[in-house]
Amino acid sequence: AQRSFEHSLQELGIDRIDLWLLHEATADDLDSSDLLPVLQQMRQEKRIGMFGIGGERSHLDALWKRHRDYCRVLQFEWSVLDAVPNFPDAFCIQHRAVSGALGAIRESFARDPALCRRWSEAIDADLASPGILAGLLLVASLESNCNSIVLFSSRVPEHIRTNVRLVDDSAWAARSQQFLKVLQNHGNGAH
């Protein structure tokens, strides 16, 4: 780990890393590891700002239970279709907030066009529009996890600008709250 860290610093041409994530680490990987004191020392020396785990959501519960000291920061995939994670005192970074749900919701709408119309009416937005649905998924993710970072990917500058505007728009915040209620009711069998 120390060699990898030093190599990263050299390749990046920097002397400090703000956030160092152990990618795809499992609880079993860390059971007999002596890495924690190394990470804590590097943090004390201000060579890293913080450390944590980046990996599959399915591994995080065991990591949280058995190795909480490694879990100050957690990065994992999450969307509004998933249960809201509960890792008190951990800073969470979520990805796939849009892409993780967009396809599933579009498939539901394709199978049941009336569902799309009902949800669109309830939310007062045309959810058949990919841009509207994607923006709503992003804002709803932020509303659901207000103390975390929600990552999204885009190569289109206008999409990035649009997403930033949506996040700052109180009407979209209200729409996203309604969207979350619709999703919750749908999950409980209400249509």
Image: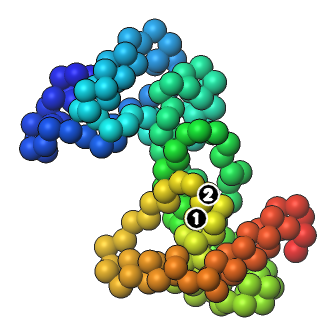
User: Could you classify mark 1 by the number of other residues whose Cα lies within 10 Å: few (under 14), some (14-19), or many (20 or more)?
Assistant: many
User: Could you classify mark 2 by the number of other residues whose Cα lies within 10 Å: few (under 14), some (14-19), or many (20 or more)?
Assistant: some
91 vs 141, nearest the viewer: 91
Amino acid identity at mark 2: Asn
Residue 74 vs residue 42: left or right?
right
Disc 2 target residue: 145
Q: Position of residue 63 (x, y in %)?
A: 56, 27
Seen at 54% across and 22% down, the residue is 67
Residue 22 vs residue 2: left or right?
right
Q: Is residue 71 visible?
A: yes
Quarter of the view holding residue 15: top left
Q: Position of residue 106 (x, y in %)?
A: 63, 74
Seen at 60% across and 76% down, the residue is 136
Disc 1 target residue: 142
Amino acid identity at mark 1: Leu
169 lies above or below 21: below
**Element carrying mark 2:** loop
Look at the numbered discs 2 and 1 and tell me whether their residues touch, using CB distance below 8 Å.
Answer: yes
